[in-house]
Image (tube, rainbow, N blue to C red):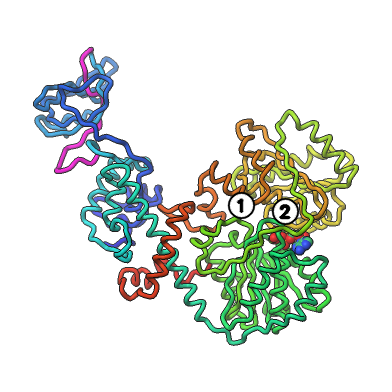
Amino acid sequence: MDLSSPVTTLPGIGGALGKKLEKLGIKTVFDFLYHLPFRYEDRTFTSAVDRLQPGETSTVIGKITSLKNEFTHRGKFIQVGQVTDGTGSINVIWFNQPYLVKSLAKNQGIALWGKVDYYKNLPALVSPDFEIPSGILLHMGRIVPIYPETAGISSKWLRTKIHHLLSVMDTAEILPPDIDMPGWLAALKDVHFPQNLETARVARNRLAFDELFLLQLASLIRKDIWERTRLTHAFIVDQEKILKFMNNLPFSLTASQNRSLKEILSDLSLSRPMNRLLEGDVGSGKTVVAAVAAYVAHLNGFRTVILAPTQILAEQHFQTFSAMFKPYGVDIGLITGASKLKIENTKLKIVVGTHALLSQNLNFSDVGLVVIDEQHRFGVMQRSRAAKIGETPHTLTMTATPIPRTVALAMYGDLDLSVLDAKPAGRLPVKTWVVPEYKRESSYKWLNDQMVKYASQAFWVCPFIEDSDTLTSVKAAKAEFIHLQEIFPRLKLGLLHGKLKAAEKNDVLDKFRSKKLDILVATPVVEVGLDIPGAALMIIEGAERFGLAQLHQLRGRVGRSQIQSYCLLFTSDETGITRLKNLEHLDSGMELAEADLKYRGPGEIYGTAQHGFPDFKVATYDDFSLIEKARSVAQKTLPKLQEYPLLRQLIKEDKIHIIEPN
Ligand code: ADP
Ligand code: MG
């Protein structure tokens, strides 16, 4: 048996139990050991029988001196007996468990945990938990772990099995011995069966450290491999031509765009591939930075592939890039699930596509740059496949997810990081109001004025129930579309949702972009990347259903020009107003993510698949000092890897995914 063996290889765990355990996410022995308590119950209080007080809950250790079934007048069984411990006796009763009479034979040593109450006017332990002591007590007389359970899998059962497993494990140690923490097995024992809550905390910390350490080590190894990769053809960065390209843009770059670009250009001139993450809040102008990099690739005779997570966004990038590269006669193509184009049949210098591109399993020696926009929307496998579109392409990944630097280090330790920390000049913060139901009518009036008098355009986003594009949200958007036509009879409305055909989506977006529509009623499909600078109003229905960071993303669709934009958050949930009001005074994604942390916990933000972060079993993303410690231990360990056979084995078996880039 090793840690990756199926849990069903453990004695006494057959297929049926295996299925139940799977419901708890337990498939392997490792999963089983890491099925950690979500809380502990303090059952240390133990009392002699003659000291028991009615109303008190206590552990009692003694003997069963009698136990028999009695019929109640309702035709049910109760089990009535006596427990003695040398200081005295007390009654004990259970309900409807006739088998206990046999299994708890007379004169058997027993430990009980329960409340002293009255039965037929006499003090009695009523329905206590019990345990037949065999050396040590697991279920009482101690701090007792309480686990996530499912039908047929109780905490009591888990405790027994996990305790047994821990007692037969041999002490495998993966960490360098000189860190100041309990050993791995000791930590597992302490986290399941702690002396006190402090030992549990220390143990949990150690297990969290392991996860962070392995992640760090994996990314350092990747970085090491990456840095030793040599390009067959290093780019020449022609500053003069780049300056000309930038001068042809309709705006000049911001200081932080320039800084990031400088970092990127310096990467591009090296003889090893770039592996950089460009992080910038919504609207900070990441696209144009990627475009300059694509231009450099083009000047060097290499192609660029740009990946976007949605067809809408791919379409938009296609248009943006086409406009920017028009003066240079560069062929640009769009490949989505809907298009017939095949990259291999083309001479396209820049290819914009969705994940449909990845399903073609491409590998072109002349692809010199791969850009992955909104990278958290791509799965790990997709991202690693993307990097293989070329032979040794430079990769630039981009995200608007606000990741604190430490978290970025934890997550993407192998990536170099560039941050766009300012928006283009002249941008006004989007004025944001939380609008309770009773103000709905008056805001309709105000909105109508804005749209009629000032020709403002509006996104009108309808809530979703689960993920961003469920049927329910489509239904809601369709209904709202009809409803809003009645409210705003003089305005032109369009409808956008994920279930539309590609051509229909493009058609409605084109109309909105060219100001033929006043209101675009939409599901949250508009959340990522959409750039329609003319739109200045963002109305969000059912705002309470969204996380703050996500509302910020939605709001980021407006405020993309120098006109004043507004965001109205409709909500009928009075209790959620304080949380939503954060958006009225906070303007940066980072601050809002931090506020979100308070309301929803780090798991919701940094632990969700939505953001592409790995799921830790123990660690969290908010323990920065532990993340830093993990990083420094990993750095010290990397050159001495030979000394840690178990670590080497984990790496060899690819348990820590060293080949998965990003
Ligand atoms: P994001 O970082 O959210 O992807 P975009 O790249 O879509 O942002 O840029 C947002 C908008 O800002 C676009 O309309 C873009 O043309 C514009 N923009 C980008 N950089 C600048 C700049 N330096 N000055 C003015 N506008 C800019
Ligand atoms: Mg973008």
Q: Which residues are magenta?
A: 121-139
Q: Which residue is mark 2?
A: 500
- Disc 1 or 2, which lies upstream in sequence? 2
Q: Is residue 338 visible?
A: no
Q: Which corner quadrant holds the N terminus?
A: bottom left
Where residue 654 sits in the image (x, y, percent)?
A: 40, 69
Disc 2 residue type (three-letter): Leu
Q: Which image quadrant for residue 487?
A: top right
Q: Is residue 339 left or right of residue 94?
A: right
Q: Quadrant of residue 45?
A: top left
Density class for disc 1 (Cα within 10 Å; few <14, some 14-19, many ≥20) is: some
Judge by depth and name the residue closer to the eye, 5 or 38: 38
Q: CA distance from mark 1 to mark 2?
A: 33 Å
Q: Which residue is painted at 53% across and 55% down in the image?
A: 609
Horizontal side of 495 relative to 577 (left or right) equals right
- Asked if residue 126 is among those painted magenta in the image, a careful observer would answer yes
